[in-house]
Image (cartoon, helix red, strand yellow):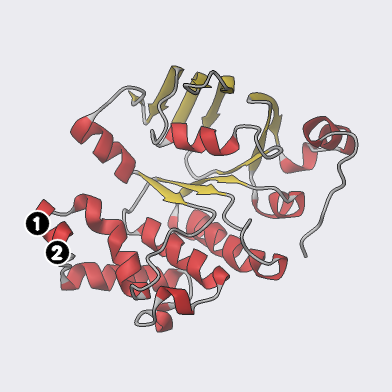
Amino acid sequence: MILELDNIVKIYPNGNKALTDVSFSVEEGEFLVIIGLSGSGKSTLLRCINRLHEPSSGSIVFRNNNVTSIQGKQLRSYRRSVGMIFQHFNLIPRYSVLDNVLTGDLGQMAVFSSLMHRFTDEQKQRALKNLEIVGIAEKAEERADALSGGQQQRVAIARALMQNPDIILADEPVASLDPATSHSVMKYLEKVNKEHGKTVICNLHFLSLVRQYATRVIALKGGELIFEGKPSEITDTWFKTIYGDDAAEVEIR
């Protein structure tokens, strides 16, 4: 197991309980997808995993090391092992594509070099290689805001790869995209998973994408884990249990 969560609880200062006793394990090389309604706790869960949010209780174990309460250098080292891809890309619009990818390496640089954005030739070559992985190396010198949404999300994947992470967390990576371009992003996450050995944990809404890309699925409802299994095990009954009796499945082709 690369990651183990045991009874994770997250209560916000306003008293809202976002997660209740969530426990599951992740095998190295999995493409694990988390599903559930908006507000079910999916994003909170990912942010607890990379410690952007502090769990209220429970434990997170990464490669047999308890990382629930680590701070300082240990936390920075752990976060380098966990790349993050956000729904809204989080690129710097006026920066070039290459410079946006290079920012993924800032956490490993000396303070002065990182403040001045002084990147080495070796870093630039790695950035270009990561852009090749996601199929847009030819866009390296273009401004990020000149790219389509799908292309910008692929830049975000390349940026995450700059950390050489063991795990990639993807928080609704296609939610801001047109359905037609969703597969163009998902296939590169799949490539990173299958060809480059990165464990992927991804929040998704569309079950058609889940069934195509996930190796395993967990479902949250009201902050509780209510389903864990293979995509093929999500029957119509489970779909309505997860999403409600009035929900209808929308397919992305």
Q: Do the residues labelled 1 and 2 touch (CB within 8 Å)?
A: yes
Residue type, mark 2 in image: Met
Position of residue 193 in the picture relative to residue 116 (left or right) = right
Percent of width and height locating residue 75: 27, 34
**Residue 244 seen from this side:** yes
Q: Name the residue under label 2.
A: 116
Circle 2 crowding by C-alpha within 10 Å: few under 14, some 14–19, many from 20: few
To which quarter of the image does residue 144 belong?
A: bottom left
Position of residue 221 in the picture relative to residue 139 (left or right) = right
Identify the residue shown where x is 40% and y is 37%.
50
* SS at badge 2: helix
Identify the residue shown where x is 57% and y is 46%.
202
Q: Is residue 22 above or below residue 149?
A: above
Percent of width and height locating residue 230: 71, 38
Identify the residue shown where x is 73% and y is 42%.
231
Q: Name the residue under label 1.
A: 112
Residue type, mark 1 in image: Phe
Quadrant of the rendering where the C terminus is positioned: bottom right
Q: Looking at the picture, tell me which residue is in the foreground, 4 or 177.
A: 177
Percent of width and height locating residue 210: 70, 49
Circle 1 crowding by C-alpha within 10 Å: few under 14, some 14–19, many from 20: few
Q: Is residue 142 above or below residue 78?
A: below
**Residue 27 seen from this side:** no
Q: Residue furthest left?
A: 112
Q: Looking at the picture, tell me which residue is in the foreground, 98 or 67.
A: 98
